[in-house]
Image (cartoon, grey):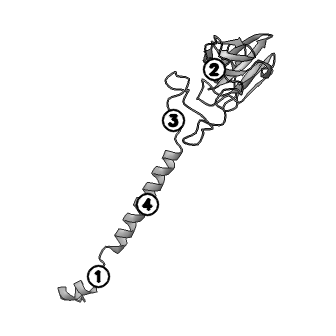
Amino acid sequence: MTDVQTRPDAEITAAQPACGGAGSSRRVVLAGATALGAGCLLAACGTDTGGAGSNGSSGGDFSNNPAPAGSKGADTGSTSGGDSGGDSGGAALALVADIPEGGGIIKGDYVITQPASGTFKAFSKVCTHQGCDVTKVDGGVITCACHNSTFSIEDGAPTGGPAKKPLSETQVKVDGDNIVAA
């Protein structure tokens, strides 16, 4: 016949470990920790720039180099001369002497250019492609190093790269030795 041994229920219960589900609890904790880690990793790898490139806005609040909390940042766009107090429309953005003819500078929130002698233009420094700040002005071209978009110093129009929209322009005028918002 069959050689089967049977044990009473009391012996079966006593042979099982006291913690019962320790193996499954460990698995549950490890699975939860893995899921949490994966979620954090995915959140950190996100590419949302606050809608700077998706809704057509210039992304004026976006900065690749934010200032510490509670500060106005190292370069607020004003010059040591400040506003001359004349009939200017705004605070000084830069000194006339600082803007090279056929070039420009990046100061504060603006790219200020002098495409021709005595003609000054100011554009947002935020690239219209994905909201990065433009990084240099050289050879009559404003360049964003993030994706190599280039813009004209004359009107901010895109001249190369993935950007399709021009940099937004701010009207400026000369007030004494300063370039001010008009």
Sequence order check: which comes first, mark 4 or mark 1? 1
In this rendering, which labeled residue sits more in front, label 2 or label 4? 2
In this rendering, which labeled residue sits more in front, label 1 or label 3? 3
Sequence order check: which comes first, mark 2 or mark 4? 4
Report, in whole angstroms, how far the alpha carbon at label 1 lies from the one at label 3. Answer: 50 Å
**Quick check: marks 2 and 1 in contact, CB under 8 Å?**
no
Q: Secondary structure at mark 1?
A: loop
Q: Which mark is residue 145?
A: none
Q: Nearer the viewer, residue 142 or 18?
A: 142
**Quick check: marks 2 and 3 in contact, CB under 8 Å?**
no
Farthest residue to the front: give it: 85
Image-based side of 31 in relation to 44, left or right: left
Determine crowd level at label 3: few under 14, some 14-19, many 20+ residues with C-alpha closer than 10 A.
Answer: few
**Quick check: marks 4 and 3 in contact, CB under 8 Å?**
no
Report, in whole angstroms, how far the alpha carbon at label 2 lies from the one at label 3. Answer: 33 Å
Image position of 74 with respect to 39: above or below: above
Quarter of the image for residue 144 reads: top right
Q: Which mark is residue 18?
A: 1
- Looking at numbered disc 4 in the image, what kind of residue is underneath it? Ala
In this rendering, which labeled residue sits more in front, label 4 or label 1? 4
In this rendering, which labeled residue sits more in front, label 2 or label 1? 2
